[in-house]
Image (cartoon, rainbow, N blue to C red):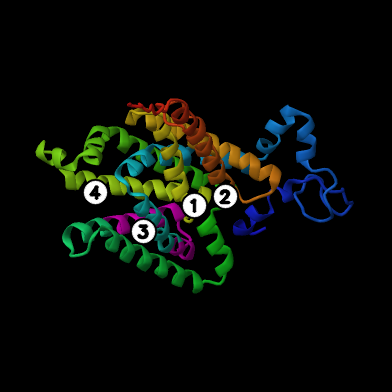
């Protein structure tokens, strides 16, 4: 089975089918209707429900990949939300396309290609905003539409337009190879290490860049480093949910953490945990309901956000309604 097509067949390819004398025992196959899906077995036995998906090596790699990506995106996403850069993160998720396609064409590592493409785009946006005559939004729009169009042109020149485009846009976490898993681990490590090392400068620049510059901090270099870390975080989410949904991993857990916590450091921890929980819930949902893994992960994160928005102890809708001061009317004669 082709690597880019494999994720579409999961978990169909892992369901039990009638044995045939001509088919080797234990081979994953699609021939014949499924006799007994794993989901119905697991609905009776809770232990089977939990262990069912992780009995396959591809699922084990997917869970590790999702955990790495969720932590990296969740931690850095707090600063993205704080600075109001959701549009930039969405733009960068499209700018990785030409680098990934070039990696496909040259049989190189797609994380490396996406990283180079995202770094070029991020620094081009920053340069146009600071040195050019364009504002922030026009600079972002020019760079990301140009990069994305170039990527689509490269995809159309290949022989497997639909498969490659689907995998790039919507992810293929179930087809993660050991090499890609190591690359994602390296990217996540760099993102976390960079965020920890530059924590206070990044926070100060995010809240008050004027005060940061007055204190002698190299604001331009700090922003350059932040854009580089953001590009790496976007690339780390490419395999998990694709370029179309990676913004969800950056923004939704971080926004949820902002509802639940006040301090930035606490928000980063909570955001990373929410991303991990959403990834695991999404993968299990994808396994048992046979839906796209990337979409299931982001939907799980959105569900957690909805619960937090409703029931958060301080900023939740219910808490605000209960603690809203009652209006008193005075009647004068």
Q: Are marks 1 and 4 in contact (CB under 8 Å)?
A: no
Question: Which quadrant holds the C terminus?
Answer: top left
User: Above or below — where is 25 with respect to 167?
Assistant: above
Q: Please state if 136 lies on the left or on the right of 11 as rendered.
A: left
Q: Residue 190's image quarter?
A: top left
Drawn side of residue 319 relative to residue 332, left or right = right
Pointer 2 or 1: first along the chain = 1
For residue 6, say whether it is visible: yes
Which residue in the protein does label 2 denote? Answer: 295
Q: Are marks 1 and 3 in contact (CB under 8 Å)?
A: no
Q: Secondary structure at mark 2?
A: helix
Name the residue beneath numbered marker 3.
117
Q: Nearer the viewer, residue 53 or 58?
A: 53
Which label sits in the foreground, 2 or 4?
Answer: 2
Pick whichever of labels 4 and 3 is earlier in the sequence.
Answer: 3
N-term mark: 1 or 4:
4
Q: Which residue is mark 4?
A: 224
Mark carried by residue 15? none
Disc 4/disc 3 C-alpha distance (Å): 15 Å
Comes first in the chain, label 2 or label 4: 4
Q: CA distance from mark 1 to mark 3?
A: 18 Å
Measure how far apart labels 2 and 1 are at the Cα level. Answer: 7 Å
Residue drawn at 38 percent across, 57 percent down: 91
Residue 150, percent from left and from top: 40, 69
Q: Is residue 300 magenta?
A: no
Residue 290 location (% of width, % of height): 69, 48
Look at the image and give the residue range highlighted in magenta: 101-123
């Amino acid at each position: 089975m082709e690597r880019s097509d494999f994720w579409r067949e999961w978990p169909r390819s892992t369901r039990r089918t009638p044995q045939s004398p001509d088919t080797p025992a234990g081979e994953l196959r699609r021939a014949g209707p499924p006799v007994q899906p794993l989901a119905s077995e697991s609905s009776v036995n809770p232990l089977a429900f939990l262990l069912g998906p992780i009995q396959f090596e591809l699922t084990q790699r997917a869970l590790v990949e999702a955990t790495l990506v969720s932590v990296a995106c969740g931690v850095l996403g707090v600063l993205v939300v704080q600075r109001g850069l959701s549009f930039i993160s969405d733009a960068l998720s499209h700018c990785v396309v030409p680098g990934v396609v070039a990696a496909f064409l040259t049989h190189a590592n797609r994380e490396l290609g996406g990283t180079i493409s995202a770094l070029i785009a991020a620094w081009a946006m920053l340069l146009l905003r600071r040195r050019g005559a364009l504002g922030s939004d026009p600079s972002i729009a020019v760079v990301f539409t140009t990069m994305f169009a170039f990527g689509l042109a490269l995809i159309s020149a290949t022989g497997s337009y639909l498969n490659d485009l689907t995998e790039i846009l919507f992810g293929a976490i179930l087809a993660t190879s050991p090499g890609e898993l190591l690359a994602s681990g390296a990217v996540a490590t760099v993102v976390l290490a960079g965020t920890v090392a530059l924590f206070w400068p990044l926070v100060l620049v995010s809240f008050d860049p004027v005060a940061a510059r007055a204190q002698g901090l190299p604001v331009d270099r700090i922003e350059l480093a932040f854009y580089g870390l953001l590009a790496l975080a976007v690339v780390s989410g490419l395999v998990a949910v694709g370029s179309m949904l990676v913004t969800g991993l950056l923004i939704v857990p971080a926004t949820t953490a902002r509802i639940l916590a006040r301090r930035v450091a606490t928000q980063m921890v909570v955001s990373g945990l929410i991303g991990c929980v959403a990834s695991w819930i999404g993968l299990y949902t994808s396994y048992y309901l046979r839906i796209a893994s990337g979409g299931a992960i982001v939907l799980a994160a959105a569900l957690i956000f909805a619960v937090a928005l409703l029931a958060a102890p301080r900023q939740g809708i219910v808490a605000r309604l209960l603690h809203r001061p009652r209006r008193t009317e005075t009647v004068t004669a």
